[in-house]
Amino acid sequence: MTTILFCLQSALKSIWREKWINMLTTLSISIGLLILCIFAVITINMDSALQRWSKNFGMVVYLNDTIDKQRQDELNAYFLKDKDISEVNFISKEQALNEVKKALGNNAIILDDFTENPLPASFELKLKDGLLEPALVKRKAGEMAKIEGIEEVQYGEKWLSSLYAISKTMKFGAILFGCAIFIAITFITYCTIKIFFHRKSEEIETLKLLGATKVFTKLPFLIEGLFIGAIGGIISSLAIYGAFIFTTTKVVEFLPSIKMMTSSMPLEIYIIIPLAGALMSTLGSFIAVGKIRY
Amino acid sequence: MIMLSDVTKSYEKEYILKNLSFTIGKGELTFITGPSGAGKSTLLKLIYCSERPDSGHIVVGDWPVTKLKQKAIPYLRRSIGIVFQDFKLLNNLTIFENVALALRINGMSTAEVKEHVNSILREVKLTHKSKIYPLQLSGGEQQRVVVARAIVTKPAVLLADEPTGNLDAGNTEVIMNLFSEINTRGTTVLIATHNEWLYQGSGRRVFHLKDHHIDKEFIG
């Protein structure tokens, strides 16, 4: 315990003694984390928007005109039993015609030329969220098209592919960007602590000769790195909180749609950022200190 | 207390020490002398495991120095007090903090550290300078701080490498008196010096190093 307290004291003294370089490092870390957070918030919001859009995604299964009521019921039961389908909605020929009429409005008059209802009966199906993968939906549609009594299966193939590609690219980008910031912060701290370590090489040598263990020698540097990262993270958290307050109170007045975006920012982020900063920074310090040999 | 058996050390195929053997008993005060470059400092470094011998065995107390693993070396060094030729004081720490460092490394509490450091500073007559920094002290005073740091942990062995190399006669006497006093308390003391004045008439054993080995052993 006394060793930890002494190392803590040494680290704090060093932070104060090297305040300018430490301040610069802390600022660099906070900027890095801030950029990462902004990107994370954008990604989270865009992802939730995509999720909302994907909830409206459906397949339309058109039925043969010759199909009887019994077959219709059998198909309804079949779709309800399918564990991949979350919602089944039957649209009769009459309902379909009414909807078209409603959509055409005053132009519905053109339908009067038809002696018979040209529209087929159909099922509107909604797939479960996790199954909205283009290949999976295509396979499902192909299977359904082969069922007796089904004329055609339609779904927004291109729309689904685009949505899926955007979502995948964004997630990949977020991981890549996160890794880049992680490496950058670790490297910044690595450089700072490496400089301190070189400056104190004589002091370290003396400590070793007096019987200091590796932990006793390394711990002040690790604590220093931890503090730098945590403070950088706290600054980022405060900046994000400030931006959040500003957005929700001021920006929202002339850009109301921004409210939808900011509402989905998780509260834990204010704790996660300093922790992440501390972790990355401590890792950088750990690498910088390296192996101590006697 | 200190036992060397057939110890050989070389740098880039050039012998520094060759088949060196001697034993120093517990509570002895012994000198190692010889011309510059004879290997006196290397010998001390081998004892506190800053260097490893090419061959041979070294034992300090219960510590088989030559067989020690890396992680055990700090603990060996805690049982040895070292007075360095170049002082190795930390200039950003006060005199008190420099002396306290050895105790902090041993994990001693703040209250104990305070008590021990004040007591040792009284002994080396530097209490009034405890709050100033090493560079504000004279060479003799700095050497007294180094001695204080070396003995504050009450080590079983004290090694001194040219402890009076840069000191005037007055300061040399003060330092030597300190060593004698420490020795009377039971600490084994080994002093490496080329200063004949230190051991002449001391009545202590002296090992003379020449051509990589001890060429004579005599009473000073």
Image: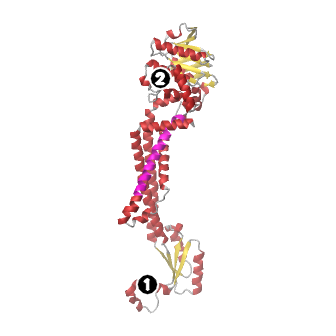
What secondary structure prevails in the magenta region?
helix
Q: Position of residue A271 (x, y in %)?
A: 49, 52
Crowd class of label 1 (few under 14; some 14 to 19; many from 20; radius 10 Å)? some
Crowd class of label 2 (few under 14; some 14 to 19; many from 20; radius 10 Å)? few
Which residue reaches farthest left?
A: A254
Does residue B29 appear in this view? Answer: yes
Which residue reaches farthest bottom?
A: A115
Image marks 1 and 2: residues in contact by CB distance under 8 Å:
no
Foreground pick, A52 / A263? A263
Q: Which residue is mark 1?
A: A100
- At label 2, the amino acid type is His
Q: Is residue B175 above or below residue A139?
A: above
The picture quadrant where one finds residue A26 is top left
- SS state under label 1: helix
Foreground pick, A257 / A155? A257
Q: Is residue A26 above or below residue A258?
A: above
Q: Position of residue A152 (x, y in %)?
A: 50, 79
Quarter that holds the C terminus of chain B: top right
Task: Answer with left or right where residue B203 lies relative to residue A173.
Answer: right
The magenta region covers: A215-244
Q: Is residue A103 above or below residue A250?
A: below
- At label 1, the amino acid type is Val
Q: Which residue is mark 2?
A: B128
Q: Is residue A164 above or below residue A213?
A: below
